[in-house]
Image: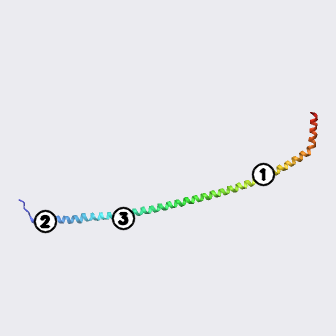
Amino acid sequence: MLDIHVSLMLIVLAIFFFLIFQLNQRLFIPLLRFMDTRDRTIAKDLEAARNMSNDSESLQAQARENLEKARSEAARIRQEAIASVKAENQQAYEAKQRELESQYVEFTQRLEADREALKSAVLSQLPLIKESLKAKFSQI
């Protein structure tokens, strides 16, 4: 019926252990080494990505800070420019107002002089005007 050959079983067992040893040496150990290397590389890349993320966040915060500084500086410069223009316009306004006031005073003086000249001319011509009016009334 079933014959068990111990020598054949020992040879099969020896071949089985030899194959296990060879598979372990040629397949499983290099495969495990590759997987460990890959895990270390992935962990290192994740850490580098976290560092880059932290760096990018700090760079973004610094960029926001720089933008805020630039905006405040631009607002300050704008306010200074507006104040400067307002001061220049105020000075120009005051100068023009003084000029117009002096022209007005000059005009009123000339007007007064012309009035006096007209008054003296009319007064000097008054007897002639009276005579001319008398002559006109007498004709009516």
Q: Earlier in the sequence, mark 1 or mark 2?
A: 2
Q: Position of residue 31 (x, y in %)?
A: 27, 63
Which residue type carries mark 3? Lys
Quadrant for the C terminus, please.
top right
Marks 1 and 3 sit apart, C-alpha to C-alpha, by 88 Å
Tag 1 residue: 104
Which residue type carries mark 2? Ile
Q: Earlier in the sequence, mark 1 or mark 3?
A: 3
Q: Residues within 10 Å of mark 2 (few under 14, many from 20)?
A: few
Left-right relation of 44 to 113: left
Left-right relation of 123 to 2: right
Q: Position of residue 121 (x, y in %)?
A: 89, 46
Marks 2 and 3 sit apart, C-alpha to C-alpha, by 48 Å
Q: Earlier in the sequence, mark 2 or mark 3?
A: 2
**Quarter occupied by residue 13:** bottom left
Tag 3 residue: 44
Secondary structure of residue under mark 2: helix
- For image coordinates 29% across by 65% down, the residue present is 33
Tag 2 residue: 11
Of residues 72 and 29, which is closer to you in this image?
A: 72
Marks 1 and 2 sit apart, C-alpha to C-alpha, by 134 Å
